[in-house]
Amino acid sequence: MNTYRLLISCPDAHGLVSKVSQFIFKRDGNIKEAHHHLDEQNKHFFMRIEIESNLTCSFDEFQQEFAQLAQKYQMNWQMNDVRKLKRVLIMGSKSSHCVADLLHRGHESEMEAQIIGVLSNHDKLKKLASWYDVDFKKVDINKDTKVSDMAKMMDTVDAFQPDVIVLARYMQIIPKSMCDKYSGKIINIHHSFLPSFVGANPYERAAQRGVKLIGATCHYVTSELDEGPIIEQDVLRVNHSDSAEEMQQMGQDIEKVTLAKGLQYHLEDRVLICNNKTIVFS
Amino acid sequence: MNTYRLLISCPDAHGLVSKVSQFIFKRDGNIKEAHHHLDEQNKHFFMRIEIESNLTCSFDEFQQEFAQLAQKYQMNWQMNDVRKLKRVLIMGSKSSHCVADLLHRGHESEMEAQIIGVLSNHDKLKKLASWYDVDFKKVDINKDTKVSDMAKMMDTVDAFQPDVIVLARYMQIIPKSMCDKYSGKIINIHHSFLPSFVGANPYERAAQRGVKLIGATCHYVTSELDEGPIIEQDVLRVNHSDSAEEMQQMGQDIEKVTLAKGLQYHLEDRVLICNNKTIVFS
Amino acid sequence: MNTYRLLISCPDAHGLVSKVSQFIFKRDGNIKEAHHHLDEQNKHFFMRIEIESNLTCSFDEFQQEFAQLAQKYQMNWQMNDVRKLKRVLIMGSKSSHCVADLLHRGHESEMEAQIIGVLSNHDKLKKLASWYDVDFKKVDINKDTKVSDMAKMMDTVDAFQPDVIVLARYMQIIPKSMCDKYSGKIINIHHSFLPSFVGANPYERAAQRGVKLIGATCHYVTSELDEGPIIEQDVLRVNHSDSAEEMQQMGQDIEKVTLAKGLQYHLEDRVLICNNKTIVFS
Amino acid sequence: MNTYRLLISCPDAHGLVSKVSQFIFKRDGNIKEAHHHLDEQNKHFFMRIEIESNLTCSFDEFQQEFAQLAQKYQMNWQMNDVRKLKRVLIMGSKSSHCVADLLHRGHESEMEAQIIGVLSNHDKLKKLASWYDVDFKKVDINKDTKVSDMAKMMDTVDAFQPDVIVLARYMQIIPKSMCDKYSGKIINIHHSFLPSFVGANPYERAAQRGVKLIGATCHYVTSELDEGPIIEQDVLRVNHSDSAEEMQQMGQDIEKVTLAKGLQYHLEDRVLICNNKTIVFS
């Protein structure tokens, strides 16, 4: 018995659910959990179906046959075998709280993922990665040689052949070409409740504005800074006695938990992107 | 164009989703939103389907024909036309925060419901009900004549022909016969985070225990006090400076919001009961 | 036995707490609860002291004598007798959820306040106010006669002699002169998690951005729109299936609760303003 | 310039704050932050004062002189120099999420503490401790030799000379003698929202009861299981699709964050114990 996940988005059409569920039924698939959502504004339909089954055909055959149905309805779709773990590359900088948290979750098999490497522009995370037996690569990013440094960074990323790239406080702006190449596959944690405090120093600006809650936002990266589709957000109560430095300290807890949660949704194929928004079938 | 909601629970069987979605498709129903859930422990399947459609058959025909499919799969099911508002009876006592909140939501059409009456064992809510043009009935409950008083109360309830009965801090234990008769139709708000502080004086006991969060629980009423299926819960932060009286005051906000939310889930046919738990397709 | 509240803010100085507590001690005041906070950036000190006492001198004498101490340390201060309820004027527009909630709290004595009136530019709230026996005044605000209309509105406000003005979704921009005159006394509820979505239509913009939490912000009004000192904020989880209209509906619950909480802090003399931020001794 | 923290609890008496603040003032102490709280039920007074100063006397002299004042008012008190880090011993079992989180915080100097050791009845945490250069001791606990094993465990604890003992999912019941010896110094994380689900298997029981929120509770350990004074609690939303196993997984995030927060309050001398409750000056 195995589990597959089918993710579909397509223009709304009469009989979609019926057609898809019949297709699965005929191949002896059993629907274990399913979510359907119609975006009424865009007349677009979204499905996530968890199939538990010894399929009567091979996974490849199933996909080839489904491709015909998919074409008919102009579906954007993917089907994943849960046994095949996604390859996750972590990119970090100096702060280690998110990276340590992800590596520990990976090590304890708390995530449906294989963490294949840590890439950084500093040495600080090297020891951490090595302790978890995870490959570490350093690519310096210097102001004066940024273009070539970034090219080298991207080559290094490509060499990892990642399914997902996690920016765990990487602190560098990702070039547009890389955003496009890995569209819907780069996940960032921003240390504010977006759209508040887009850009640099959000905790300082939060302290300055005197907000009573600080937040963290996990989102897909696009070429527009901090404007990509939001996957998950959370907040934490602060008060007048908390300085910007203390907020930064406290905020680390929601950063790591929110990043882990958003990443987990992605790994479990729960997220579909619609324009600049996400459908999260949680 | 109209919207119907189909709620189904039944033993898991191969092809269920396929059969149901085909049935809808053939009658020109369009699935707008759907949730499917398999309870793996009990091998029980749950569906909520929102159908947007000019059905090709009448609502009655649809139901008659569906009954055959339902029988085959031993379905427990219901189908509701969203235009037909559920008849809600509010039962209260002396405290008015939940009742006032529900009446205001009813008055402003914020709920899919028709509030048909307020029933109480005290006069205090009379003015409130009358102002909202809602029928008010008082049935005294005295210690010495409790059995006959309760009988009278139940007759009064029956006379209202309610679809849903909301215990908005009614403070009397509902007789077993009434619990059974209106099984899955009586919704209570308990002023604690169940299963903490079952029974009387939860805020006093919360203050005594020194908890850092107080809560409220919206649940279906069964003959076992505060043990019915939970629909919704929420909590609120308190601290050492909050006395039991202040907790009671502060708690009113989560009581009213949690009751309204749980009730709304019920009114929108989002809740299915499985043994002593709920499936809430929110 | 009575309770007084002393609120002080002043430049930090050695021995402040000692001097103030001795002053109270000598007049037989008993400190029941106290909070002291030093803003290290601005070297400014803040105190809130709750005094429970039969003072040996009159309240007026106490204040006259304290004024000398206050002058020496350049204190900004006030002392309030809790028996003297603050006069609250509610200003609203068409939506009634916040106004109804405040009126109900006032009616049930859940707030340390005397609600003296409802002022609106529409008739909709009239019935609500009259039912709670609260004075209702309507002042039309028209595009073409805005300047004179606003002047009339301000005269009406002045006539109420309010201690606090609550903008319960008033929807009009308050003139600078009024902001200045009632500085630190006008409390607004903004239907977003500021600084996200300053200005109009925050729910629409929240839906468009695809945020996963919506919020509400209770703040003092200054002449800069939605930029005044924040007293309290809260958020609510939403998801992809919630339209802007549904968010608006759901958001009403945090709007009313957040406004009530922020207002309560103010009424209980828990809020001190420091530049554009608040110290809330909760 | 240095910072000291003075924690006082004593029977309420007239002039307490005045006397204490004068005492500090005369020795050139500057009060940076202070909280005072009167427990009206028990007529007990609580203070936390943060003193920033080059004291005119030595720390020892200050304490000796203060002892006289303290005696007069029957104070239970302590004064700590923030430069002197508390010695923290972590006790764990097989699950590593809390231990790894604490070790990482210690390593990154995110806590005012010196982590002096990890003590466990299993080998699993050894590698983790060694990587963070923290002393690891294993003391087996067997059913048949529990009494002597526990004695050995307690000897090992004593040898560490800890200021604080953190039970980071230790899973063994601590003997009464150790609870008494380290009264107010042993901090436990319980994986439920107490008083719900005292004892074993809280997630299983939470799943069975169908709660909509699961929780974690950080509390001081007393000889009554899960009944000690609560320092901090938090909750997390779950739904019908989350099994007991998934709740356990999800719960790890609030366990580690709630434990870290409660511990931090203790390390920063923010917690005072009053009977079975805590005053937390956060």
Image (cartoon, coloured by chain):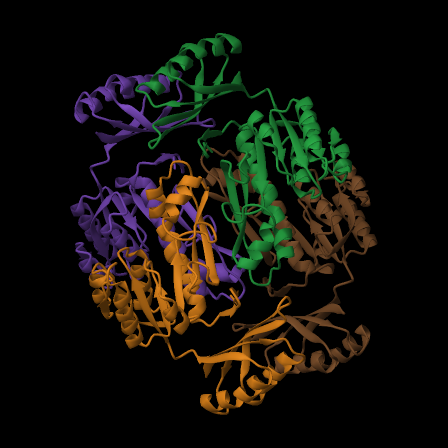
Chain colours: A orange, B brown, C green, D purple
Q: Which residue is more in the foreground, D151 or A167? A: A167
The relative height of residue D70 versus residue A23 in the rendered view (above or below) is above
Q: Residue D21's spot in the image, x, y percent? A: 32, 20
The relative height of residue B137 versus residue D81 in the rendered view (above or below) is below
Does residue B278 appear left or right of residue D83 in this picture? right
Q: Residue D79's spot in the image, x, y percent? A: 25, 30
The relative height of residue A86 versus residue D115 in the rendered view (above or below) is below
Please report the residue visible at 44 percent of the width from the left and 60 percent of the height from the top: D203
The relative height of residue D31 versus residue D156 in the rendered view (above or below) is above
Q: Which residue is more in the foreground, B116 or C191? A: C191
Q: Residue C258's spot in the image, x, y percent? A: 56, 41
Q: Residue A49's spot in the image, x, y percent? A: 54, 76
Please report the residue visible at 66 percent of the width from the left and 81 percent of the height from the top: A15
Does residue B182 appear left or right of residue B198 in this picture? right
Report if residue B251 is visible in the image.
no
Q: How many marks?
A: 0
Please report the residue visible at 44 percent of the width from the left and 12 percent of the height from the top: C66
Q: Which residue is more in the foreground, A267 or D178? A: A267
Q: Quadrant of residue D7?
A: top left
Q: Quadrant of residue B70?
A: bottom right
Does residue D61 appear left or right of residue A248 in this picture? left
Report if residue A218 is visible in the image.
yes
Q: Quadrant of residue C155?
A: top right
